[in-house]
């Protein structure tokens, strides 16, 4: 049984502990954050204000992100999870287990994600949040499997539900908790507080700042932040999850083991777990007396026709949020907080909560942009028939940085962050866009600067990048799961997160071995249905609306028919036509003719049903640039003839 210390007095007692100093290896950091001065910038507020201050503190002081391999290194774990007798403290049973790494064998310890990877909304796997030593704990392999991916909660304490830490001979050593199938796992009382404080830490650290009242996600662009709720990992509603965690936090106060562990991990990483140093913070943030507040993203962007959930939340009170748009012609918002872009420009969405006669609100600036005529980057589900095109090579929210050149390409952190929504990459892709060009039986991969990406052999792990075209090519393959890329030399393009390398590279497959590492995801710039619809409308317009160089006005009835057809277009398709310029292929031809007609004949007979607002923007034209047949030739001939006559008259006058 672990020794308990008072809930509110762990920090003072820390200085009286006889804990041996941590011996630090070069693979981890060597920091000494003072447990008192570390919190000198934290105010005396509570609720979302305190939560935001702690988030900013954790991300700004997390100097070294340990790797998943570090989390199984006995040299480190015997320090972070010491039983004070030279071995390791098994997390769930709070009982000694041998310090040596047992490769997941029964009776040895394995790495436990207290907040399971599968419950993290894709925020971590085996790096960053998934290898943070404040988060990962040593758990006997059988118990690790018994918990599996179950949420935490309360389970009936029957012998059938008991789960034990067992030795190599499958003999029970100590009770570790209770499980209801693969649905819910309840740890023993002596580890419940530890679980709660780890979950408080992970929630505070890895929620993106806009969700927890912070101002920054730190300077390390590789760390993935997002949206986490306690109910993701605790069985029940969000309110029930918070109540359960607070009760476990109080039931099982901070122990000397936790304090010693906090010191050891802080020395390795640079940051501390504030809910161990200051247990009172949990009640101040999530307790019943917290001042109500509303939290919402400061800003985000949409294209016309695109919809996105606002994600506003109420803290410290019970209220149904109301939503108000400052300009519904730019962005509308539903009663459930779904924002839709309607027109190019900016609008502010106010999220409003009414609690006990008072109003609490937060504002979000929405920028609405025209839909892209180029299409969108969509995840490849199969090998494309047409290889040529623009692509993004990614792993999760990290993409290969296409701005790198030469040897810089084959380095750790050769990545940029991208934003994903379902099967699409959204936002700016300028620094990760690549061009695939078919050649021989495969294709070349080129950066915007003209550098080739390739591997010339299958003997080592590398990524070549040069201006000269190599003999080696690439090809698509589904041999190693999903749609991947294999060099003609045999090496496979993968992503490596081991030891925080965080890089894309070709890995050898000699002897038919699996290359290991993580498979990549490939996105191709594809024409979506909105672009296709806009192109179809443009083709119909060009065939229906004739102008004859302005000699004969176009048919008013044909114009009205096109206006009726435009009413059936999506907002995104209309946006493409509204913002298109004269270089955009068939769409460009159509809008130039459209603009010419309105300028020449006015909107009384030819209404601007595309809302292009063209008057005075492009200047006047005297000739329809898209008239076909002899009309254009005759007009040009007439202009040339008049010019020749004027010239001849001028010459004769001069001679006379």
Image (spheres, grey):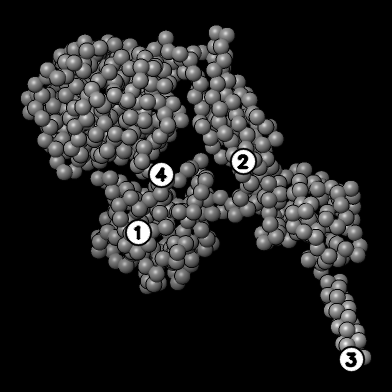
What is the tally of numbered marks visible in this picture?
Answer: 4
For residue 653, what is the image quadrant?
bottom right
- Asked whether disc 2 touches disc 4, contact meaning CB atoms under 8 Å apart, the reply is no
State the CA–CA distance, disc 1 to disc 2.
Answer: 34 Å
Between the residue at mark 1 and the residue at mark 3, the CA separation in whole angstroms equals 73 Å
Q: Tell me how far mark 2 sits from mark 4, CA to CA.
A: 26 Å
Residue density around tag 1, few if under 14, some if 14–19, many if 20 or more, within 10 Å = many
Q: Measured along the vertical axis of the image, is residue 207 above or below residue 617?
A: above
Image quarter hosting the N terminus: top left
Kindly identify the residue that appears in the image at 37 percent across and 62 percent down: 405
Q: Residue furthest left?
A: 85
Dot 4 falls on a residue whose secondary structure is: loop
Q: Position of residue 401 (x, y in %)?
A: 40, 54
- In the image, residue 335 above or below residue 592: above
In space, the residues marked 4 and 1 are separated at their CA atoms by 19 Å
Q: Given contact means CB atoms under 8 Å apart, are the residues at marks 1 and 2 in contact?
A: no
Mark 3 lies on residue: 655
Q: What label sits on residue 396 in the rendered view?
A: 4
Disc 3 or 2, which lies upstream in sequence?
A: 2
Residue ID at (13%, 27%) = 82
Which residue is disc 2 drawn over?
Answer: 368
* 195 or 21: nearer the viewer: 21
> What secondary structure is found at the residue carrying circle 3?
helix
Earlier in the chain: of badge 1 and badge 3, it is 1
Residue receiving disc 1: 409
First-in-chain label (1 vs 2):
2
Left or right of 280 in this view: 257: left
Badge 1 element: helix
The tag earlier along the polypeptide, 4 or 1, is 4
């Amino acid at each position: 049984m672990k020794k308990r210390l008072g809930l509110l007095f762990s920090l003072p007692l820390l200085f009286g502990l006889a804990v041996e100093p941590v011996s630090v290896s070069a693979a981890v950091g060597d920091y000494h954050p003072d447990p008192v001065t570390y919190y000198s910038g934290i105010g005396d507020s509570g609720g979302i204000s305190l939560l935001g201050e702690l988030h900013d503190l954790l991300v700004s002081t997390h100097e070294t992100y340990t790797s998943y391999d570090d989390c199984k290194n006995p040299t480190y774990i015997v320090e972070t999870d010491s039983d004070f007798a030279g071995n390791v403290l098994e997390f769930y049973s709070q009982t000694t287990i041998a310090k040596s790494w047992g490769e997941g064998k029964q009776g040895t310890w394995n790495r436990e994600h207290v907040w399971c990877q599968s419950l993290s909304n894709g925020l971590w796997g085996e790096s960053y949040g998934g290898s943070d030593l404040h988060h990962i704990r040593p758990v006997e392999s059988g118990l690790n499997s018994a918990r599996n991916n179950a949420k935490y909660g309360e389970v009936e304490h029957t012998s059938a539900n008991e789960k034990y830490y067992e030795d190599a001979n499958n003999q029970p050593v100590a009770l570790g908790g209770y499980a209801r199938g693969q649905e819910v796992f309840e740890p023993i009382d002596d580890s419940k507080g530890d679980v709660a404080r780890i979950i408080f830490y992970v929630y505070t650290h890895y929620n993106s700042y806009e969700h927890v009242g912070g101002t920054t996600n730190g300077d390390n662009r590789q760390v993935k932040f997002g949206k986490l709720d306690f109910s993701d990992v605790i069985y029940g509603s969000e309110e029930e999850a918070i109540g359960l965690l607070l009760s476990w936090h109080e039931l099982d106060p901070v122990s000397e083991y936790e304090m010693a562990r906090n010191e050891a991990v802080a020395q390795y990483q640079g940051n501390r777990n504030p809910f161990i140093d200051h247990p009172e913070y949990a009640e101040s943030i999530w307790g019943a007396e917290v001042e109500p507040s509303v939290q919402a993203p400061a800003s985000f962007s949409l294209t016309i026709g695109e919809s996105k959930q606002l994600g506003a939340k109420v803290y410290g009170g019970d209220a149904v949020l109301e939503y108000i748009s400052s300009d519904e012609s730019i962005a509308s918002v539903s009663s459930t907080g779904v924002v839709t872009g309607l027109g190019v420009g900016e609008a502010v969405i106010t999220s409003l909560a009414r609690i006990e006669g008072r109003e609490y609100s937060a504002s979000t600036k929405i920028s609405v942009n025209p839909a892209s005529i180029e299409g969108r980057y969509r995840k490849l589900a199969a090998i494309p028939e047409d290889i040529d095109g623009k692509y993004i090579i990614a792993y999760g929210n990290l993409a290969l940085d296409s701005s790198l050149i030469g040897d810089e390409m084959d380095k750790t952190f050769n990545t940029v962050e991208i934003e994903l929504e379902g099967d699409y990459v959204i936002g700016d892709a300028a620094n990760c866009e690549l061009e695939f060009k078919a050649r021989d039986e495969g294709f070349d991969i080129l950066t915007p600067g003209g550098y080739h990406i390739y591997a010339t052999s299958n003997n080592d792990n590398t990524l070549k990048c040069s201006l000269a075209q190599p003999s080696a090519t690439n090809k698509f393959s589904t041999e190693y799961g999903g749609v991947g890329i294999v060099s003609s030399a045999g090496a496979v393009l993968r992503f490596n997160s081991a030891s925080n390398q965080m890089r894309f590279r070709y890995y050898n497959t000699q002897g038919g071995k699996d290359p290991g590492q993580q498979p990549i995801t490939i996105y191709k710039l594809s024409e979506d249905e909105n672009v296709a619809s806009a192109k179809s409308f443009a083709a119909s317009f060009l065939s229906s609306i004739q102008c004859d160089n302005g000699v004969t006005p176009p048919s008013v009835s044909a114009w009205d028919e096109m206006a009726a057809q435009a009413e059936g277009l999506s907002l995104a398709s209309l946006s493409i036509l509204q913002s298109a310029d004269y270089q955009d292929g068939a769409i460009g031809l159509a809008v130039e003719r459209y603009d010419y007609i309105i300028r020449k004949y006015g909107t009384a007979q030819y209404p601007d049903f595309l809302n292009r607002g063209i008057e005075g923007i492009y200047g006047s034209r005297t000739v329809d640039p898209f008239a076909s047949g002899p009309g254009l030739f005759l007009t040009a001939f007439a202009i040339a003839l008049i010019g020749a006559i004027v010239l001849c008259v001028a010459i004769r006058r001069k001679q006379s």
